[in-house]
Amino acid sequence: MALSVSVVSAEREVWTGEASQVSAKTVEGEIGILSGHEPLLALLAQGEVRVTTASGEKVAVEAEGGFLSIDHDTITIVAGRASVA
């Protein structure tokens, strides 16, 4: 089952799509997310959000500040600043 991922910044939507895996830096450390992950709300640390799409493509997004939310295989990343690296 694929993850539905949305990465937005204060200005715009940065990336949206389906993924098999997402990795991100939080203020408490690195987190890896696969399908079936428990619901979670975490504060993002400055760094790279790495997305592996359902087709295997790698997407890197530089994110600064904000939060990450996981609920029912839906990941929402809201960052103060974000851009595809």
Image (cartoon, rainbow, N blue to C red):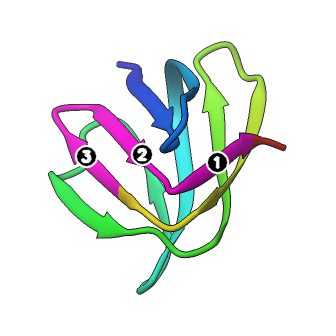
- Quarter of image, res 41: bottom left
Position of residue 60 in the picture relative to residue 63 (left or right): right
Residue that numbered label 1 is attached to: 82
x then y, percent, for residue 85: 84, 44
Q: Nearer the viewer, residue 50 or 32?
A: 50
* Depicted 14 relative to depicted 18: above or below: below
* Callout 2 crowding tier (Cα within 10 Å): few <14, some 14–19, many ≥20: many
Q: Disc 2 residue type?
A: Ile
Say which quadrant the N terminus sits in.
top left
x then y, percent, for residue 49: 63, 53
Which of the two labelled residues, at mark 1 and mark 2, occupies the earlier sequence position?
2
Q: Secondary structure at mark 3?
A: strand
Position of residue 72 in the picture relative to residue 9 (left or right): left
Q: Disc 3 residue type?
A: Ile
Q: Nearer the viewer, mark 2 or mark 3?
A: 2
Q: Disc 1 residue type?
A: Ala
Contact? badges 1 and 2 (CB < 8 Å)? yes
x then y, percent, for residue 17: 52, 16
- Measure the alpha-carbon separation of dots 2 and 3: 9 Å
Q: Residue at x 45, y 83 (%)?
A: 27
For residue 77, which numbered disc appears in the image? 2
Position of residue 21 in the picture relative to residue 48 (left or right): left
Q: Secondary structure at mark 2?
A: strand
Q: Residue at x 27, y 50 (%)?
A: 69
Which residues lie in the magenta part? 68-83
Which of the two labelled residues, at mark 2 and mark 3, occupies the earlier sequence position?
3
- Measure the alpha-carbon separation of dots 1 and 2: 10 Å
Q: Nearer the viewer, residue 1 or 72?
A: 72
Query: Was residue 6 drawn as part of the magenta stretch in this picture?
Result: no
* Callout 3 crowding tier (Cα within 10 Å): few <14, some 14–19, many ≥20: many
Q: Residue at x 77, y 33 (%)?
A: 58
Residue that numbered label 3 is attached to: 70
